[in-house]
Amino acid sequence: MAQELVAASTLIFAATLLAALSGAPLLVPGLLSVSRGQLLATVLMLAASALGLIGAAVALISGSSEIFQLAWALPFGPAEIGIDPLSAWFLIPIFLITGCAALYARTYWHAGHYPHNVRKMTFFFGVMTAGMSAVVLARDGISFLFAWEIMALASYFLITTEDEKPEVNAAGTLYMITTHTGTLGLFALFPLLNLLSGSWLFPAAGSLTASSPLAAAVYLIALFGFGMKAGIMPLHIWLPSAHANAPSHVSAVMSGVILKVGVYGIVRTLSFFNAVPLWWGCSVLALGGVSGVVGVAFAIGQHDLKRLLAYHSIENIGIIFMGLGVALVGQATGSPAMMLLGMSGALLHVLNHALFKALLFLGAGSVIHATGTREMDLMGGAARRLPYTALLFGVGAVAICGLPPLNGFVSELLIYLGFFQGIQGTGGAAAAAAALAAPALALVGGLAVACFVKVYGIVFLGSPRAERHEASHEAGWPMLLPMLLLGSICLVIGLAPSLVAGPLGRVSLTVLPLLVTTAGLPLQELAPLEMITIAGALLLALISLVTFWYRRRLAGTVCSENVTWGCGYQRPAPRIQYSASSFAGMLTSLFAFVLKPQSHPPEIAAGIFPDRSRFSSHVPEAVLELVYIPALKRLYARFSGVRKLQNGILQQYVLYSLVTLVVLLAVSYF
């Protein structure tokens, strides 16, 4: 088994290095043409994806851990990297989604159409992939921060691929500010961990007590630093604009994987502690509930297709946090069932969300590629010209709504079962928290269904709303094949969840070693996985039979094309169809106290024949525009005098450094 793990680690290290170098040939002038360089980079990324997936799968199946000490030393001690089931679980979406996105980009962002920025995008795409892999492999604080910063900087250059557009630069600037704000939290996190464990190396799972004030500080700082990257509300402010303005395949990776690297950081930090207090679990559960409900409410009010999907990422990060909260509450109350169900549900939703959200972003990219716009109110009727994209996007929509027989249903069911265990088996605050969280998750699911009914109806059904943006062509096979692969995996997990039960149990044991010392029921005994398979197969068979019967019935009838009924209008037109805002108007008004929607009513002139008027509405990024920016402006005005310290005089800066050193020496002496 040790030899298998070493071989798996070798494959993962090779995949990381190959991904980092995949775009390098494009940077050498005259070596290859841009088109051939992109093709070579795509082949190298696919090879890295295959090697990484094989290595992660072997490591996950083995269930063992291995630590490797690097040959060079860092300023604060040795550098270590390692592989264990938790790292392997997160490496699967890292290499799977980036491989799919690389193949997709070969057509979507072809060198012939984007010769000015394809070199930058291709190079930093590989660097970002390597950075994410290095983050989950790092086993000391310094190496972790190096990898984290590489990932963050590469992501910035990918977000700003089209840096000639002002809105893209604004999104990149906001991302850079927030990601480095979160990184400042990590600069405080690892020294505090060093004080607790006595080393810059990561402590063993369950080796630190969570009862001290220092442990509470570590928990809160980790929640801030990693929560900023994960996009948990209200730390999500960078996410909507970054996902909307990046190329669609980059958005798929950012939403499907980069957010999960933030989740990984939180899970890894929580794994260091034993006997966590109840308030840790309740706070994570509350953050998850707020992020889930408010995130999907913001999604309902969006007109921009990619911005809508970005808000659904915030919603699903909330669902993951709810699962983590259940596991922590179970750890605090000594409930192995809650621990296993909550952690397994959260970890499975990490993978599931990576799959269906990448599928949805790639599907959105196909629609944008065909229509030339992200505005849903300018789309319509795309299913006629894009039948395969419509089908695969529909698969992703059903999965993200948590409906059977797809994978989103399975992970959400595990979290529900964790809630029910908490309600039945515990008392006091733990039972109350679980009882409140269960309907919140149900509300999230219902609102998600309403939102994707809106999306699918507006984008794919009806008639084109603007002739200039009518869908013109279906995507080519390099774009459809990754979508088909992701959709197929969503279906396989939804129909056969027992396939992932064993790996989920091993990963949960890595995070919560207390499960080893308890009765430790296997996941199959706590969740009806076999019944899910049977029910899903029956449902799929029923859908197939109804579809076959319907097509047989249509085959014998005369088909004709007519416009949609115009509600009594004598001259129906596409503009009288439901728009994105009118469809969601009632739900948006229900959450107006949070969303703060803004309406711009028409000014109707007097007279028998008034001029044409226009009504518009939009939902702002309320947390950023109405909370953070006003607060920062007041802070800026309050500390205007401090800015005089930054005057450009070098000698004065040297004096600042000298005074700081003297103060630090004095503090250390006394």
Image: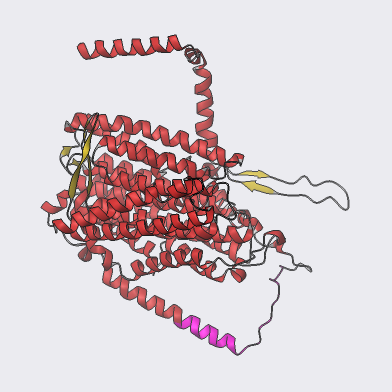
**Whether residue 102 is situated above or below residue 474 in the rendered picture:** above
Q: Nearer the viewer, residue 19 or 246?
A: 19
Looking at the figure, which quarter contains the C terminus? top left
Residue at the image point whose x is 67% and y is 64% from the top: 464
Hey, which quadrant is residue 140 in on the image? top left
Queried whether the magenta region covers residue 546, the answer comes back as: yes
Please state the horizontal and vertical placement of residue 317, each as a whole percent of the image. Answer: 39, 49
Q: Nearer the viewer, residue 12 or 547?
A: 12
Q: Residue furthest front?
A: 30
Residue at the image point whose x is 59% and y is 57% from the top: 368
Residue at the image point whose x is 64% and y is 65% from the top: 472
Please state the horizontal and vertical placement of residue 281, each as a whole percent of the image. Answer: 28, 44
Stretch of the chain drawn in magenta = 545-566
Residue at the image point whose x is 45% and y is 35% from the top: 178
Tell me, yes or no, if residue 63 can be seen here: no
Q: Is residue 98 left or right of residue 522?
A: right
Please state the horizontal and vertical placement of residue 550, each as a whole percent of the image. Answer: 53, 83
Queried whether the magenta region covers residue 559, the answer comes back as: yes
Looking at the figure, which quarter contains the N terminus? bottom left
